[in-house]
Image (cartoon, grey):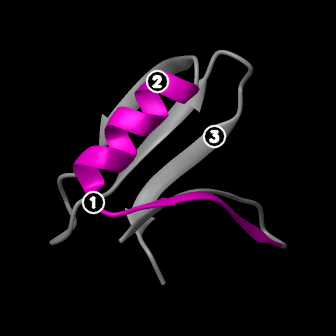
């Protein structure tokens, strides 16, 4: 399971939960107007960050 989340120093909000990283990535690209997308290759697991045209920052990461 993977989640699309946003977070601040004070809270973490889960926006969507999907079965796989690939499905989360496809969903994000279809639902958000993404300005910049970056997969984090430094982790042993799949994760990514993206910024929307509205300036919102999200992450795709394994569900907790």
Q: Which mark is residue 40?
A: none
Question: Of 48 and 2, which appears nearest the observer?
Answer: 2
Report how many numbered discs are placed on residues in the image: 3
Picture quadrant where residue 36 is located: top left
Q: Earlier in the sequence, mark 2 or mark 1?
A: 1
Residue 12 appears left or right of 18: right
On the rendered image, what quadrant is the N terminus found in?
Answer: bottom left
Cα–Cα span, label 2 and label 1: 15 Å
* Mark 1 Cα shell of 10 Å, populated few (<14), some (14-19), many (≥20): some
Residue mark closest to the camera, 3 vs 2: 2
Residue under label 3, please give it.
57
Q: Secondary structure at mark 1?
A: loop
Establish if 37 lies above or below 61. above
Disc number lying in front (3 or 1): 1
Residue 34 in the image, given as x and y percentages of width and height: 52, 21
In the image as oriented, which residue stretches furthest toward the bottom? 64
The residue pinned by badge 1 equals 20
Residue 48, position as x, y percentages in the image: 36, 48
Is there CB contact under 8 Å for labels 2 and 1?
no
Residue at x 80% of width, y 71% of height: 11
Tell me what residue is drawn at x 27 percent, y 60 percent. Answer: 20
Q: Is residue 26 left or right of residue 17?
A: left
Q: Which mark is residue 30?
A: 2
**Circle 3: element type:** strand
Q: Earlier in the sequence, mark 3 or mark 1?
A: 1
4 drawn magenta? no
> What's drawn in magenta, residue-wise?
11-31
């Amino acid at each position: 399971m993977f989640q699309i989340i946003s977070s601040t120093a004070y809270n973490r909000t889960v926006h969507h939960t999907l079965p796989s990283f690939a499905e989360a990535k496809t969903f994000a690209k279809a639902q958000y107007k993404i300005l910049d997308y970056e997969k984090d290759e430094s982790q042993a697991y799949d994760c990514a960050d993206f910024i929307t045209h509205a300036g919102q920052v999200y992450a795709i990461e394994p569900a907790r």
